[in-house]
Each structure stands twice: as C-alpha cells, then as structure tokens.
Image (tube, rainbow, N blue to C red):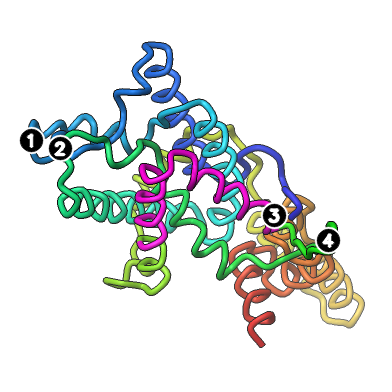
Amino acid sequence: MNSGPSGFHNAPVTKAFIIASTIFSIFFGIQGRFNSLGLSYQDIFGKLRIWKLIISIFSFSSTPELMSGLYLLYYFRVFERQIGSNKYSVFTLFSVLVSLLFEVLAIALLKDPAANLVTSGPYGLIFASFVPFFLGIPVSTRVRVFGFHFSDKSFIYLAGLQLLLSSWRRSILPGICGILAGSMYCLNIFCVRKAKFPEFISSLFSRISLPSMGSPRAASTRNIVGNISSYPGRPAERNYSTTIQSSLEPREDSIATLVSMGFDRNSARQALVQARNDVNMATNILLEAQAH
C-alpha cells in the first residue's frame, strides 16, 4: 500500500504514542530491566504494582519487539487519517483499557504466581488496529510470489504474526486481548464509535505534531463570494463558476492521504471534488462506493 504523505501528517495521536513507547522502552532498556517487565499474577493480585500496569501499556520488553511494534504503530496511522484524530483518540483509549482488562482477567484465571504471563508493550492498540485494518482498508496492489498470491496488506499481517509470536504465550495472550478489544470497537459496544473527546483534549495531541499548512478552502470561498460582480449577465456567472471549480481542485497532500489508504488516485481525486476537499467525507464516499 502506498505510504502516502511521509511522517506523521494528520496523525498526531500516533506520533504521541510512538514517542511515549520509544522513551519508555529505551529507558528500561538502558537500565537493563527488559526482563523485569511484563505482568504476573503476583504483580496484580499480590503486591498490586500499579506502575507495572502503566509500563505494560507503553514499554516493549525487547529490541526486536520494539522495532516491529513501532513499525506497525507507524503504519496504522492510516487508520487515524481515515477516521480523524479525535475518534482515533477514543479508539486508542478504548483499545488500551479493554485489552488491559482482558489481560488482567486472563491472569486471574491462569493463576500462575511465579511467571510473567503477559509481555509488556502496546499490544492491545496494535492488534486492535488489525480489526479495522482488515475491515476498512482496501487492497491496492496484488503480487504473486512462487505461485502464492500476496497483497500489500499481506506483509502487514506477516509483521503482526511475527510480533504475536515473538514471546510465544506471553505475546499471544495480549495479542488476542487486543483483537477482542478491536472487535468490540467495530461492533460499536457501548456506542463507543460515536464518542468524542472535547476539542481542548484532542488538540493536545496536535500540539505535539509539527505545524502543517491548513486548507485555505474557507478563506478562498469567502474571497470569491466577496468579489462576485453585482452586475447581471452570463459572463460574470461563468467567471464565478470557473473560479469555484478552481478553488475546489483537490490538494496533492489530500489525494496522497487517500491513496495511502489504498484508494485509486483518480477515484480519490473525484471523491475530493465531490466532498469539497474534505478528506473524511471523501473517505466515506469512497468506502460507500466500494460497499456497493
């Protein structure tokens, strides 16, 4: 799948989460405490180590897991671009908390006081993201290798499988919990897909991102309206129509954002024209067209 705009364009929540995971993982890695991470029955029901619950959300327990996990988190920024940062913030919080709850319940059922049953890291968010990735992100390219058919999405699934099996049972358990959390989100349990954070909270993530140029659509439209000639006649109407059409020409970064989701470039451009350069609305148009 085309990677689209480089970096964290329109993905401030993903950027914040990756920064947090990197800092936590490097900090404990430098201290040589990778082996002490992870959740056990004793941590939760014995000494009640709340700090381990927090660490388990962000810090990976090995360098290979860190590299694979950060790659998948970075790739899944396409989902944030699709639904918007505000709703993606809700998805992130819901996935992390629900998957953590499932992990605690699983540890309580297994009751092994000696072993770390769950490896640490944002497995909940990563594997929850695989559910909307499977359901909502279309395939853009297909290849055939040694007689086997692959798509651009196949390589993401292989990366997820490698991460899922990285610590065997310790990583499989949080992976399954993440998939359950993502399924609950897509099933709209508790109407979570309609939830939104207040704008002042979601804007905190945007401040982490580098400044980006906003769309000049609204200002351009106001200028056009203000400059319309008051004289009657078809020439003025034609000039106004031409100017409007020019102002609605999609921006390249908006087209690239939709292409990064797997949509055809020409279809993406037409959807943006129809949606008046609103990326979220154009995404809905394209998804509805595919559904039919």
Which dot marks residue 292? none
Residue at figure coordinates x 50%, y 31% from the top left: 66
Q: Is residue 177 above or below residue 139?
A: above
Tell which tag, 2 or 1, sits nearer the viewer: 2
Residue at figure coordinates x 18%, y 42% from the top left: 112
Categorize mark 2 by other alpha carbons within 10 Å: few (<14), some (14-19), many (20+): some
Mark 1: which amino acid?
Answer: Gly
Quadrant for the C terminus, please.
Answer: bottom right
Mark 2: which amino acid?
Answer: Pro
Residue tagged 4: 143
Label 3 to label 2: alpha-carbon separation: 48 Å
Mark 4: which amino acid?
Answer: Val
Instruction: Give the dominant element type of the magenta stretch: helix, strand or loop.
Output: helix
Check contact, mark 2 vs mark 1: CB within 8 A.
yes
Span shown in magenta: 153-180
Tell which tag, 3 or 4, sits nearer the viewer: 4
Element under label 4? strand
**Which numbered disc flags the more N-terminal residue, 4 or 1?**
1
Categorize mark 1 by other alpha carbons within 10 Å: few (<14), some (14-19), many (20+): few
**Which numbered disc flags the more N-terminal residue, 2 or 1?**
1
Quadrant for the N terminus, please.
Answer: bottom right
Label 4 to label 1: alpha-carbon separation: 52 Å
**Which numbered disc flags the more N-terminal residue, 2 or 4?**
2
Residue tagged 2: 113
Element under label 3? helix
Residue tagged 1: 46
Check contact, mark 2 vs mark 4: CB within 8 A.
no
Label 1 to label 3: alpha-carbon separation: 48 Å
